[in-house]
């Protein structure tokens, strides 16, 4: 019997669930099934925007991760010394997060709750709703937006998007980082990546497959015009499987306005941009010693 059925059986025995409720969820319970399996990684390592944002947070800043899932972003931020509270309605997601936090030797406060009805009782420097909004009704998003604005400290950040961008299928991808007024001013600059107008044409782009080897990609498309690399040291979720204690590295290969993400020499996502891609670059000294997370190489060789 598959592990998740055994788990469901146990829940039924305890009278907690009477059916496979998650099958009614979007994608037939893709998230829930992934959270019940410690050997898979549903989303891979931390989101690139979270890696970019971490250096500008105050040391030990309080972070609230709403709809945290298995906790790839919470785990990364806790590993950088931030005080993270992570909330998801999936008990399996919170269990998995707590399991890996304990393996990594970091503390994350996990809470099983519905973000649409919970009260946010404390104040935070960063509140994230990452890949969460498309699960909520417009009224729920309005309620939550008001609550998180109130509970963000002056000068704090709201990271708020509905599709976090694992590019396995084409999907509009909006990302927003808002800064609450009252702080010391913007601690980062938004840099537009220096792209030319060249891009992979649609027939070539459609031949790039998730899971393809980096060397095959290079034979198909040639060397990229620009590479943007993100490194997350310490125990992190890998792109296609469970966690790795050797960290996570993601390389974005830009061909004009098309981009392919590579981790462990394998293609894990592909993206096409309608407006110029941008990144956040911290101004001045930052709180993280390992703030060499973006090593950018023009005309990568
Ligand atoms: C696409 S996953 C994103 C997980 C995580 N933020 C990440 O980026 O890896 C969406 C998550 O939102 C959670 N979720 C959806 N609706 C929720 C709600 N009303 N309350 C709490 N969590 C919710 C799901 O259980 C799932 O873990």
Image (cartoon, helix red, strand yellow):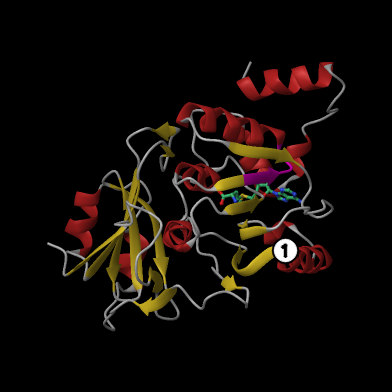
Measuring from the top left, give residue 20's x and y in whole percent. 77, 32
- Please report the bounds of the magenta region as a residue range: 85-90
Q: Is residue 297 left or right of residue 50?
A: left
**Which residue is denoted by mark 1 in the rendering?**
148
Residue at x 82%, y 65% (from the top left corner): 143
Q: Is mark 1 within 8 Å of ligand 1?
A: no
The image shows residue 71, relative to residue 258, as above or below, that is above
Q: Is residue 236 left or right of residue 116?
A: left
Residue sticking out furthest to the left: 301
Q: Is residue 10 left or right of residue 38?
A: right
Question: Is 89 part of what is drawn in magenta?
Answer: yes
Which quadrant of the figure has residue 98?
top right
The one nearer the camera, 287 or 257, is 287
Q: Is residue 218 left or right of residue 32?
A: left
The image shows residue 249, relative to residue 8, as above or below, that is below
The one nearer the camera, 129 or 241, is 129
Measuring from the top left, give residue 199's x and y in whole percent. 29, 76
């Amino acid at each position: 019997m598959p592990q998740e059925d055994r788990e469901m059986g146990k829940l039924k025995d305890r009278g907690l669930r009477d059916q496979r409720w998650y099958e009614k969820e979007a994608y037939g319970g893709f998230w829930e099934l992934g959270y019940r399996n410690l050997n898979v990684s549903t989303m891979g390592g931390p989101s690139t925007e979270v890696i970019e944002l971490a250096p500008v947070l105050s040391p030990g800043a309080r972070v609230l991760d709403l709809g945290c899932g298995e906790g790839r972003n919470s785990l990364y931020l806790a590993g950088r010394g931030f005080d993270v509270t992570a909330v998801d309605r999936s008990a399996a997601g919170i269990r998995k997060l707590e399991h890996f936090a304990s393996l990594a030797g970091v503390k994350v406060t996990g809470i099983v709750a519905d973000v649409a009805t919970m009260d946010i009782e404390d104040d935070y420097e960063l509140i994230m709703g990452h890949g969460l909004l498309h699960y909520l009704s417009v009224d729920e998003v309005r309620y939550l937006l008001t609550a998180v604005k109130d509970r963000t400290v002056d000068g704090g950040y709201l990271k708020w998007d509905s599709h976090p961008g694992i590019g396995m299928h084409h999907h509009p991808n909006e990302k927003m980082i808002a800064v609450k007024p009252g702080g010391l001013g913007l601690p980062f600059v938004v840099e537009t990546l220096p792209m030319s107008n060249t891009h992979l044409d649609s027939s070539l782009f459609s031949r790039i497959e998730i899971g393809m080897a980096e060397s095959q990609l290079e034979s198909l498309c040639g060397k990229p015009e620009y590479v943007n690399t993100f490194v997350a040291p310490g125990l992190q979720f890998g792109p296609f499987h469970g966690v790795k204690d050797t960290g996570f590295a993601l390389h974005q290969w830009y061909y004009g306005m098309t981009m392919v993400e590579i981790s462990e020499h394998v293609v894990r996502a592909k993206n096409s941009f309608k407006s110029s891609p941008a990144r956040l670059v911290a101004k001045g000294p930052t709180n993280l010693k390992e703030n060499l997370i973006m090593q950018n190489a023009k005309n990568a060789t």
